Image (tube, coloured by chain):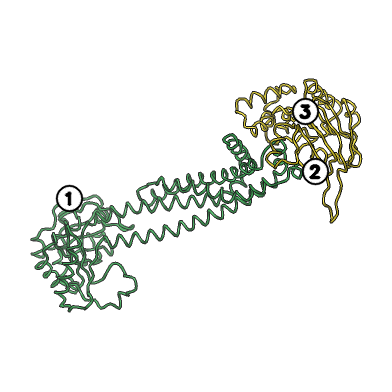
Chain colours: A green, B yellow
Amino acid sequence: MIELLIESLRVSLDSVKANKLRSFLTTLGIIIGVMTIIIVVSIIDGLESQVMSTFSSLGTNVIYVQRRGWIMRGGSDWRKTRTNYVDMNDYYKMQDLSTTAEEIGISISNYKNIKYINEKLEMINIDGISASCMSIQNFEVDVGLTLSENDIKMKKNVCLIGKDISDNLFFGANPIGKWLTIDGNKFLIKGILTEKGSFFGQSQDEIVLIPYTVMLKYYPTEKRHITILLSSNDPEETIEEARWVMRISHSLKQGDDDDFSINTQDALMEQWKSLTTSIFLVMIAIGSLSLMVGGIGIMNIMLVSVSERTREIGIRKSIGARNKEILLQFLFEAMTVSLVGGVVGIIVGISVAFTISKVAHLPFAIQIWSVLTGFLFSLGVGLFFGIFPARKAAKLDPVECLRYE
Amino acid sequence: MSKYIIKMENIIREYPFKGGVVKALRGANFKIKRGECISIMGPSGSGKSTLMNVIGCLDRQTSGTYILDNIDVNTLNTDERADIRKKIIGFVFQSYNLLPKTSALRNVEMPMIYAKMKRKTRLERSEELLGLVGLSHRIHHLPSEMSGGERQRVSIARSLANDPDFILADEPTGNLDSVMSAEIMKILKNLNDQGKTIIIVTHEAEIANQTQRVLHLRDGIITD
């Protein structure tokens, strides 16, 4: 059996070598299929660990009270649900009533053009925040000073800038103590934030933080678009509590729907996971389809091989090969061809995944199980699609075979 | 052990053909003793190939009894017939039937793979057999790199691989010139001198006359 396997392996490798182009075309389906599996698994994996680390850099266990939900709940169209603004009043109520939140903060986002002397940047994320947001949202000051309670209270025109702003407006010069113009108003730069990296391809360092009180001073209408942030060690409890506070604050009666949304990263993460799962399933379906097409290719080429080698089959039978041994020979051969395709697919897949991870700045990881799956799938395809041609070969009549020219 | 390696009684082989039948063998009645060197001679179309296929257990007779080495071959299944071809019969074909793209050594080794011999034994024996037919210097050559005579010698070496009871040679010199033919016949006669039973199927009287006994096949009929 082992000898026969080695023998078949030798024969099949010979025939693969003798028909390089044909073998390549035959195994292309297998190569693409296995490659797809490897690449998809690796990239989704990389994205996953990237997203996880980004989520935690946003601040874990943070609850966001906002007018709109991040996630569309199945069936209900958010445009039809009556919602109300989350405003300063809600923020004060939350501060008065919440007992489970560690810290409570407020954040108002806006996109404005900024400039320093003649250098301009357009549509930059300006966050008006309370001092507590620094810790809730994991903002750290790399160089300089942070926003103080006093800055907030006294509505001072001060700001902290992200790494990208520092790089793109000041080109290495020290920005601290300089005056940054935001939408025509001048702000003293107090500090530079520690780099956070990008999130879904969007830089988190292209940001300017100012006191929320200053934001409201210049843009009073924004008071209706605030986000209340709560950090908590017991998020579930705090979510319930925040909901209770908001219902009181909005004077909702029993039976009324919530007219606000409580968002958490967990829910977002779940959304993200279900998205990657769908992508994953689609790609696996494509991979499987291509494996199947590859399998049909192998069956086809094996049938050609059987008829090309009819005489060889006759010779082998005349010197004592049993039908089963002929069957195994052709089956092993189909599996070898398929496996060669699988191995090439694994190698190409790993290289492509590596290249993509380098280009997209994703962490690179290859799961052993994906390599194993690719390996076993290609073997399985060879077995499944090789069995019919192999049986055909085994059943041939030796007399007919020897007469075959 | 029986004195006779082959006993054929009333062997008939018919093929269905266009609604009727073609009788390729109409009656084969003969015995071959162990250690004999015998030729079966007949013109083309006389049923030589059919008889050879039946003797070689590649084909089944329609009726009649074929006793090979005390075994009624007709009672055997496909696997058992394959085993007979592997252990008892050594084939030598007119067109050599060597595996192309496969070295002489590996061609000779092939039957021993199916006999499940150890690799080391196989290689040693293959070299030894190729030495016996005078091809020690050509063991790694491919059939396409060899002359007809050399190929036929490889094929003889292969037929001896599993130490068969007899060699069944179908027109072994049919594709060779007279010098090479003589060489092949010399090897076969040497083997016979060493006790191997040799059966040569041929249409050439010149070849047939070199054997101890000649059986004539005419219109599918052959008798002792």
- Mark earlier in primary sequence (2, 3): 3
Residue A184 seen from this side? no
Q: Is residue A89 left or right of residue A60?
A: left
Same chain for the residues at labels 2 and 1, yes or no?
A: no
Which residue was labeled with disc 3? B2
Q: Which amino acid, by three-letter code, is at mark 3?
A: Ser
| Quadrant, the N terminus of chain A | top right
Same chain for the residues at labels 2 and 3, yes or no?
A: yes
Residue A379's x, y, as percent?
Answer: 53, 46
- Decide: is A346 above or below A246: above
Residue B211's x, y, as percent?
Answer: 87, 26
Chain for numbered disc 1: A
**Closer to the observer: label 2 or label 3?**
3
The CA distance from mark 2 to mark 3 is 22 Å
Q: Is residue A110 left or right of residue A349?
A: left
Q: Which amino acid, by three-letter code, is at mark 1?
A: Val
Which residue was labeled with disc 1? A143
Q: Could you say which is closer to the camera, residue A251 or residue B81?
A: B81
The CA distance from mark 2 to mark 1 is 100 Å
- Decide: is A92 above or below A201: below
Chain for numbered disc 2: B
Which residue was labeled with disc 2? B61
